[in-house]
Amino acid sequence: MRLDPTPVLPLAVVHQEGLVGLVAVLGLAFRPGGPLPALSSTRPAVVWLGLGIGSGLALAGGLWLLRRLPALERLEQWQRELVGGWSGPEAMVVAVLSGLAEEALVRALLQPVAGLWLAAGVFALLHLVPDRRLWFWPVMAFALGLGLGLVFVHAGYPACALSHGTVNLVGLLRLRIAREGSGSRA
């Protein structure tokens, strides 16, 4: 059973995440004080930087430990075909922007109103794909959403955005390396 997705251009993802970020900032603009309080941290920079990078690496490490699960192998094969041809700088831009935009929407805007579990559920829904063979992506996103939500509770938006960006960067770079190693680089 081979999955053959059409490769996605990084610019398309940048546009998508830009729209997600815009929706988040517009939603946060209706909060008292505007978007800035929701997107700030009360922790010193060294704390949220450490928690963001550390938790991102821990979450990425957890996924790496699960990499031999058939459902995750299938998902990674599909993702390799989707984004494996991106350059390192393209992967970095998408990883950073997706962390900033998705965490602004799900954690900064939604979680304070809806709670941790519902916000993680919405995060999982954002990762649905119309192929039942890829059921693991929203399940994985739900678990990661809980972890990112806890980072948000303890260290604020900058830390969870950095954590999310770190998870995505590690994953995207792994996909690039795996694709190059398999000799199927386009």
Image (spheres, helix red, strand yellow):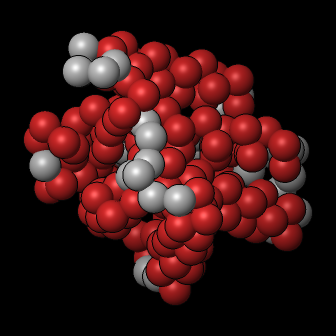
User: Can residue 3 be seen by looking at this rendering?
Assistant: no
Drawn side of residue 68 relative to residue 172, left or right: left
The answer to which of 108 and 119 lies nearer the viewer is: 108
Horizontal and vertical percent for residue 146? 27, 62
Above or below, comparing residue 164 to residue 29 in the picture: below
Using the rendered view, name the quadrant where residue 69 is placed. bottom left
Q: In this view, does 4 lie to the left or right of 150?
A: right
Residue depicted at x 32% and y 44%: 107
x and y percentages locating residue 16 in the rendered image: 53, 23
- Camera-side residue of 38 and 117: 38
At which x and y percent is residue 3?
A: 53, 51
Quarter holding the C terminus is: top right
- Residue closer to the observer: 38 or 88: 38
As drawn, 174 above or below 169: below
Q: In which quarter of the image is residue 34?
A: top left
Q: Left or right: 121 with respect to 163?
A: left
